[in-house]
Image (tube, helix red, strand yellow):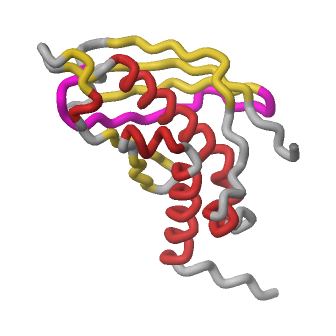
Amino acid sequence: MSRKAPEPVQVVKQRRDAALAALVAGVPYIQFLGISFDRRGDELTAVMPFDEKLIGNPLLPALHGGATAAFLEVTSIIGLSWGMIWDEVESGQLDPEALAQGKLPRLPKTIGFTVDYLRSGLPRDAYARAHITRSGRRYASVKTEAWQDNRARPFAQATGHFVMPRQNG
């Protein structure tokens, strides 16, 4: 009984990176905000580099609450979507080239999204991670936390509830 040889690490990494890049490219608002995603295995960290257009109060200066909320929501949706497609990416069933050509899976739709502003976002890079607390066929819940210099001191956090897209439809 012979076993199939494992794929080279480079091939797996390229497939993962291509799938994530295609998923992110499918949401134009992500590019507007300048958000990127750092991937380590199945864990994603969103990065929103500082830009003057993100300042809401120039007297402090502080990040705009809408930019902060959008950053948290985008992180939640991409994190949830990444969780949905992870098994298909790993097994090679999901073709990254098809994703790059715009054949994206449907994204979860936001039902409700609550943001807690814990302190002012400073004029510097921000980071966020989403934690899926429940993911079923129809519904998912996600908690997301954003920080800047110290992960133990988040400046905002959010809880989101999402309708999951139909698998074959």
Task: Find residue 54 and report its image quarter.
Answer: top left
Can you give x and y, in whole percent of width and height, for residue 126 in the image?
A: 29, 34
- Residue at (39% x, 51% y) in the render: 38
Chain part drawn in magenta = 121-138
Please tell me which residue lies in front, 54 or 3. Answer: 54
Residue placed most toward the observer, 116 or 6: 116
Residue drawn at point x = 55 percent, y = 41 percent: 78
| 62, above or below 91, in the image | above
Task: Indicate the position of residue 36 as horizontal and vertical percent values.
Answer: 39, 48
Q: Is residue 93 magenta?
A: no
Quadrant placement of the C terminus: top right
Image-quadrant location for residue 125 = top left
**In the rendered image, the vertical position of residue 157 relative to residue 90, given as above or below:** above
In-front residue for pair 88/24: 24
Q: Is residue 16 left or right of residue 116?
A: right
Vertical order, 81 against 19 (above or below): above
Image quarter hosting the N terminus: bottom right
At which x and y percent is residue 150? Answer: 21, 31
Task: Residue at 68%, 34% (x, y): give it.
Answer: 108
